[in-house]
Amino acid sequence: MPASPLDPADRAVLEHLVREGLELLDAGRLDAAALDLEEAREIAPEEPTVLAALGELALARDEPDRARTLLEAAVATDPGLADARYALARLLDEAGEHAARTEHDLAVLRLDAAAHRRAGLGGRRDLALIEEVAAEVLDRLPEPFASRLHDVPIVLEPRPGEAIVAEGFDPRAFGLFEGPDDHGRRRIDGIDPRPTRIVVFFANLLDAFGRDDEDLREQIEITLLHEIGHYFGLDEDQVDALGLR
């Protein structure tokens, strides 16, 4: 038997509790978040947004089995919950259920694309800021890294393509390094025909960090340096040690 629809007053209270609960969860205040979300569940025990938020709380508490049960229930009721699908995909990946993970990740990709279009992400100002930060990062690169990177294009795309997500790539990644790395491009014994490029997924960045210039600038820089590190075969500690931060 379907649940009775909520009246407007209860719906408003429910939305406030879920929103506040998620904010508390983001702030690391798990007990306070739990109070809000359990109160929301008393109002609407089968509401998918409540189940999804409780699933995220269970993840934060390192309760993967409970998280999976809650997230699966949320997605079964509302397949359009992109965040719930994304969290569930990560759990499925850890469980080795890669086909199911990919199904959810492809759905996330489509749902995010629609949400990004509605939000108007990637306008002229957005792209200009990303290009500006990218230029600043490249200008600060020490030698010999700068010279060896000068012909590697940095490309802006809204989000990963369906083909690479189907291969297991994160649909909400911020960046990607593709093609032969620095060592591969300089080998004498052969030439890899694949083009080398660094991709910045601007819609994913803007969705995660908004249009706050300071936070967004920092994450653009982190993303670029991470992918540049991949190009040179460096791990995170080596990136720091060589002054690429």
Image (cartoon, helix red, strand yellow):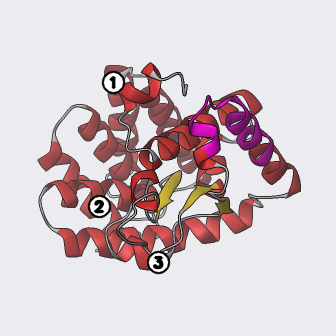
Label 2 packing within 10 angstroms: few (<14), some (14-19), many (20+): many
Horizontal arrangement in the rendering, residue 38 relative to residue 126 (left or right): left
Which circle, 3 or 1, is nearer the viewer? 3
Give the SS element for disc 1: helix
Quadrant where the image shows the N terminus: bottom left
Question: Which residue is depicted at the point 62% across and 57% down?
Answer: 152
User: Three-letter amino acid code at disc 2?
Assistant: Ala
Quarter-of-image position of residue 124: bottom right
- Pointer 3 residue: 193
Mark before the other along the chain sequence, 2 or 3:
2
Above or below, 105 relative to 233: below
Question: Which residue is depicted at the point 72% across and 27% down?
Answer: 214
User: Three-letter amino acid code at disc 3?
Assistant: Pro
Horizontal and vertical percent position of residue 65: 12, 49
Q: Report how far apart the C-alphas of labels 3 and 1 lie in the structure.
A: 50 Å
Horizontal and vertical percent position of residue 72: 25, 63
User: Three-letter amino acid code at disc 1?
Assistant: Leu
Q: Report how far apart the C-alphas of labels 2 and 1 lie in the structure.
A: 22 Å
The span picked out in magenta is 131-147
- Pointer 2 residue: 89
Horizontal and vertical percent position of residue 87: 33, 53
Residue 30 circle label: 1
Q: Report how far apart the C-alphas of labels 2 and 3 lie in the structure.
A: 33 Å
Q: Can residue 2 be seen here?
A: no
Quarter-of-image position of residue 238: top left
